[in-house]
Image (tube, helix red, strand yellow):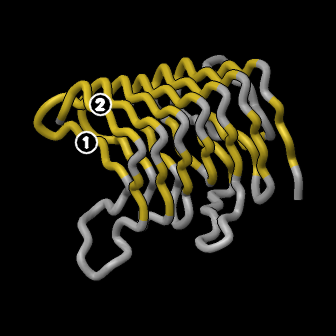
Amino acid sequence: GGKNIIFNNCEFSHTGKKRLSTSPCSGVDLEAENSVVKDISFNSCFFLNNTSTGILADVGDVSNCYVNNSTIWGNTKYSMYLKRDGFKFTNCKIFGGFLCYGKDVTFKECEIEDRNHSDYGVYNAGYLADFSGCSNIKIEGCIIKHTYGKGMYSNGTIEPMTIRDTIFINNCDTLVSG
């Protein structure tokens, strides 16, 4: 666990790529196994080429995590797997499919794309973002571009840029190519 932790200008890359590794081999694994994980900030951080996700949050009492001005690549697995609440991404670059099953998650002024990395490729889940089971998701002022699969996936239906009762998309540019 941990509270009020700030990471500035850190790189979380190539996790699990050598002989010695531990599960889940994510760049960052936010797990509240014995105590709370709350109010964690990542500022100007970089996540690339991890065996699993760039950011993982799926166990225990994890909330209020802030990711600012950071780049998150999903090369061999999802860029992010978020099953916890209160994440806020501001001015981030998110490349590769991701899962977001939490509540009160915000993406503000982000670039979200399934862009292929020149050295490590990009993880293609068949959709750019899966918001199944989420609630109160806000996507504001983002550029969303999908090339290799569908756009947003929510509640069992794949449709480009689907807006559901719990997903609010405001002032975004959406681009489809390929």
Q: Check residue 62 in the rendering and tell me which mark sits there, or answer none.
A: 2
Q: Mark 1 packing: few (<14 Cα in 10 Å), some, or many (20+)?
A: some
Q: Check residue 163 in the rendering and tell me which mark sits there, or answer none.
A: none
Q: Mark 2 packing: few (<14 Cα in 10 Å), some, or many (20+)?
A: many
Three-letter amino acid code at disc 1? Glu
Left/right placement of residue 26 relative to residue 89 reads left
Q: Can you say whether 71 is above or below 61 in the image?
A: below
Circles 1 and 2 in contact, beta carbons < 8 Å: yes
Residue 115 image-quadrant placement: bottom right
The single residue placed furthest to the right in the displayed view is 177
Q: Can you say whether 4 is above or below 34 in the image?
A: above
Q: Pick whichever, 146 or 119, lies toward us.
A: 119
Q: Look at 61% across and 32% down and name the residue there.
A: 91
Mark 1 lies on a secondary structure that is strand
Residue 22 image-quadrant placement: bottom left
Residue under pointer 1: 31
